[in-house]
Image (tube, rainbow, N blue to C red):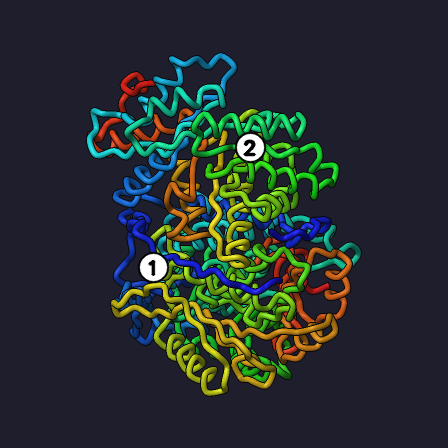
Amino acid sequence: MPAISGKMEFDTAWSYAPAPENADHIVLKKRYELFITGKFVKPQSGKYFETLNPATGKPLAKVAEGSEADIDKAVKAARKAYTNHWSKLPAKERGKYIFRLARMIQERAREFAVIESLDGGKAIRESKGVDIPLAAAHFFYYAGWADKLNYAFPNTNPSSLGVAGQIIPWNFPLLMAAWKLAPALATGNTVVLKPAETTPLTAMKLAELIQDCDFPPGVVNIVTGAGATGAALVNHPDVDKIAFTGSTEVGKLIRRATAGTQKKITLELGGKAANIIFEDAPLDQAVEGIINGIYFNQGHVCCAGSRLLVQESVKEVIIRKLKDRMETLIVGDPLDKNTDIGAINSQQQLATIEAYLKLGQAEGAEMFQSSCPVPQNGGYWVRPTLFLNASQSHRIVQEEIFGPVLAVQSFRTVDEAVKKANNTHYGLSAGVWTDKGSKIFQMTQKMRAGVIWANTYNKFDPTAPFGGYKESGFGREGGLHGLMPYLKM
Amino acid sequence: MDNSSYNIPYPSIDQVGVAERAARLMSRSIKKEAKIFALKLALNMVDLTTLAGDDTPGKVRQLCYKAAHLHDALPGLPHVAAVCVYPNFVRIAKEAVKGTDIQVASVATAFPSGHSSRQVKIDDVKYAVDEGADEVDMVISRGRFLQGHYDFVQEEIAAVKEACGHAHLKVILETGELVTLDNIRLASDLAMDAGADFIKTSTGKIQPASTPSFTLVMLEAIRDYYYRTGRMVGMKPAGGIRTAKQAIQYLVLVRETLGEPWLSNKYFRFGASSLANDILMQLVKQETGVYQSLDYFSND
């Protein structure tokens, strides 16, 4: 590409007026209890913690803190429901319950979307357009498998495991609950679910729907709390299966804790995906893919395209386009329909990201941030950020930041791109942008990542298996593969 | 002028990606004062157009009066950017808009098909300019373009540009006949390199005319050309933009692709005949709180 001269100007007299999604219809309780045996019960400790709105820093509700005793109660409820009811139910009846839940989520999608944005800070555009519809789609998809397991895995006589303990993260609260619950229930297991402590509200709303659906008591139990609550679930002797999505650090603890037990486990952990742009890529669409790859959900995405690898012949133009595109991103009120990037999920995560911003500069990478305005209101905000001239040995290239921060590197040949992309202890996802179909196949065969997107990024579908290599975990969620971790065959 | 030949479309365009980006931009929620601002801006960008076989001097005069007096009942309205007519009505239009800064644009070069000799096309342009046209809207030779004769098309545009003299040149690609986004991108690049002041989607005689995807690809071509040369080229989507809502969506495309400098009728126009009245209806609604029947707006 020839040299670049013209300078763009995105400051304009035409500013968009606020367009907030109506939240008047949202009813939040002051206090949320634990959901055990189909009822809302007080925690035995009597302790509650606050869940905040990260866009304001103000509390939304109090939530019960589940202890070891509560986990024990929940596991016993799940075991009883499994033995007495759920495992005896004809498979097609199981399916009906899950279909009903899927329909009810669809019917109340707007309510769920608003609560997801209030509690987690994500832009309403995403909670309405991605999180909630996908959560419903997962329940629909797995409901369909419930009575077809013999056809999914012929001649294996698949049967359920028993009680599944499931621990989910704060980045896609309802969607992760759906990823976990749908296959577990469809295969005939009962569940104890532990939502993340910063984002428990949509899970508690889901508990209300589970009641309304008339699920047999104890089939789904939801115990809120922090790390200790999760540990109690992992260590409970009567749990047959642990499914965890979260950090690699905690994943390692879980693997140690379950070693030598009968518990089956699946782990979906961190990532540091390479998003690779070749010179023959559709460049403007690739820029959009880079933006979606790293700034989707404030970068709180395990499969985020957090390492940009761009071929040197188009590096200058891609970076120019990327910077200009970043200037038009709108950071602010998660409930505003025009917001592109919402609030960072918690103060703790904000501190982590800010530490990496300092680290990247100290390591010698050149930082660029969008000049877009950010609210100054006690909420948690980070401007969309690039680090140019990053190198493989920088920690900002090696470690998962889990925020809107992109490390940019360049490469010359296909081999160099593959080498750099694979040179990480993670292996969850990657993106390849080129107009040549043959190059896409050449790349995907050589790359060690569970999901590779070609000429797009962050596309999800319940029919597609998702999971990692190396320290990104093992086991697959979604698709036919997502049934296997919940079955004996 | 860049004389490279255009055998390889570059960069390539991914249709799915373009549609997604356009859809995302069009979902922007523009309300209240931002909406009024956009509506007035859009009104000021309209090329009020009549290009029918049964056009008469009287009809053209009425159109010109409307151009300057959109809806006198509502004070503080801008007028449109230009009126767009066939060459033989340019003199009449020019007289009718005298005393305003409304431009007179004329289609030329064997509009709308573009099937004629180079000499006839040049003469057509010269006639329009001699009659007083401020702007010339030419059509490219789509047949030759699709046959791969890119140099022919580029030379033709350059020749027309020369014939325009001081008049601004808008180059109509006729996107509906170019079909693919790669073609539209290539034709945009080629027209800008040949000296186009504006690139324009369509004649309005072929469907699909202007779509958000076509427009986004052309805006991105304009941005790349600006990166490359520092020269600002204008954009004119035409055909199929009938509602105020659509107009606002197009302005969002411009705002977030090219930014502030292009948000003026110097660099962005709507080729439309019925759009103005729909915008007027919206503006009156913002003022009075109720929608009025179209009978309250003149249909010149």
Q: Which corner quadrant holds the C terminus of chain A?
A: bottom right
Q: Residue at x 59, y 86 (%)?
A: A393
Q: Position of residue A212 (x, y in %)?
A: 41, 48
Near mark 1 (Cα within 10 A), the count class, few <14, some 14-19 or many ≥20, is many
Amino acid type, mark 1: Leu
Find residue A96 and name its label.
none
Q: Is residue B12 left or right of residue A114?
A: right
Residue at label 1? A118
Q: Residue at x 56, y 59 (%)?
A: A289
Secondary structure under tag 1 reads helix
Vertical placement of residue A480 versus B47, above or below: below
Q: Is residue A365 visible?
A: yes
Q: Position of residue A267 (x, y in %)?
A: 59, 72
- Residue A375 image-quadrant placement: bottom left
Viewer-proximal residue, A148 or B7? B7
Is there a contact, CB below 8 Å, between mark 1 and mark 2?
Answer: no
Q: Which chain is home to disc 1?
A: A
Q: Position of residue A181 (x, y in %)?
A: 53, 59
Amino acid type, mark 2: Met
